[in-house]
Image: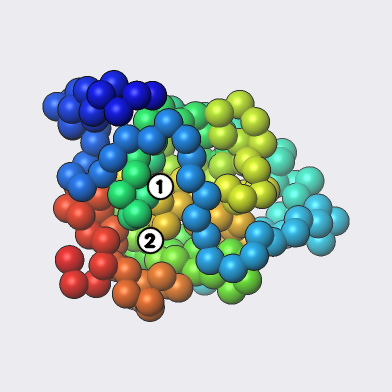
């Protein structure tokens, strides 16, 4: 896309309240992560949901793929100031997991666990939105390893670091506590529309 076309598109999306402040349009999907890309072994992979739930569960990769699936069309916004519009994700809605594990009333937050001990904190009420899912596919194809294959969380209304790559589990907890990036200076919540990038924003 030529610069003038991109600027016109950005202005249009900002007018339609789809481009948050401080963000710029990209048609690509930049790859950003900390550390190496984990290797996926379907025979050893599992996904666990624990903590303040009535029914802790564990799925193998084969079992996880049998859960009900859905798809969403959404925009995504990275804390590094790019936004990508109309991305299609397919996977398992968070609400499916929520209903199966039956969180206790005091469970107000989720600590998301991923490969290499990566974590991120997200309020339960945010995860219960209709467009939050545990994605296995993007734009009609399986996620690439660089974008979180085999499983990543998608929380479209927060900065993309909350959409954790290489998910391995969720822990329901009563009190908010920082995950990896939050311990390293990022905002505890991460609302793109309020530019909550860092802990001083």
For the point 43% across and 43% down, the residue is 132
Q: Earlier in the sequence, mark 2 or mark 1?
A: 2
Residue 115 at what x, y percent from top left?
63, 66
Residue 95: image tag: none
Instruction: Give the quarter of the image for residue 185.
Output: bottom left
Where does the N terminus fall, quadrant-wise? top left
Looking at the rendered structure, the secondary structure element under dot 1 is loop
**Which of the two residues, 156 or 32, is positioned nearer the viewer here?**
32
**Which of the two residues, 72 or 103, is positioned nearer the viewer here?**
72
Where does the C terminus fall, quadrant-wise? bottom left
**Which of the two residues, 84 or 71, is positioned nearer the viewer here?**
84
Q: Colour scheme used in the picture?
A: rainbow
For the point 35% across and 65% down, the residue is 108
Residue 122: image tag: 2
Q: Mark 2 near mark 1, Cβ–Cβ under 8 Å? A: yes
Residue 71 at what x, y percent from top left?
52, 29
For the point 24% across and 36% down, the residue is 19
Residue 30 at what x, y percent from top left?
48, 45
Q: Is residue 142 left or right of residue 192?
A: right
**Which of the two residues, 120 or 181, is positioned nearer the viewer here?**
181
Q: Is residue 40 left or right of residue 71?
A: right
For the point 59% across and 68% down, the residue is 35
Q: Alpha-carbon distance for marks 2 and 1?
A: 9 Å
Residue 155: image tag: 1
């Amino acid at each position: 896309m030529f610069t003038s076309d991109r600027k016109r598109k950005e202005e249009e999306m900002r007018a339609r309240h789809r481009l948050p402040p401080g963000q710029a349009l990209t048609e690509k999907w930049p790859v950003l992560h900390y550390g190496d890309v984990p290797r996926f072994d379907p025979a050893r992979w599992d996904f666990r949901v624990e903590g303040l739930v009535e029914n802790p569960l564990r799925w193998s990769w084969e079992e996880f793929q049998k859960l009900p699936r859905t798809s969403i069309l959404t925009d995504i916004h990275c804390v590094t100031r790019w936004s990508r519009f109309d991305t299609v994700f397919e996977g398992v809605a968070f609400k499916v997991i929520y209903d199966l594990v039956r969180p206790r009333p005091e469970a107000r937050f989720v600590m998301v666990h991923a490969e290499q001990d990566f974590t991120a904190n997200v309020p339960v009420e945010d995860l219960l939105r209709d467009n939050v899912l545990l994605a296995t596919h993007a734009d009609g194809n399986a996620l690439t390893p660089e974008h979180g294959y085999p499983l990543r969380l998608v929380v479209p209304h927060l900065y993309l670091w909350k959409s954790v790559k290489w998910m391995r589990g969720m822990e329901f907890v009563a009190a908010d506590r920082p995950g990896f990036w939050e311990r390293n200076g990022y905002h505890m919540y991460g609302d793109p529309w309020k530019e909550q990038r860092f802990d001083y924003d």
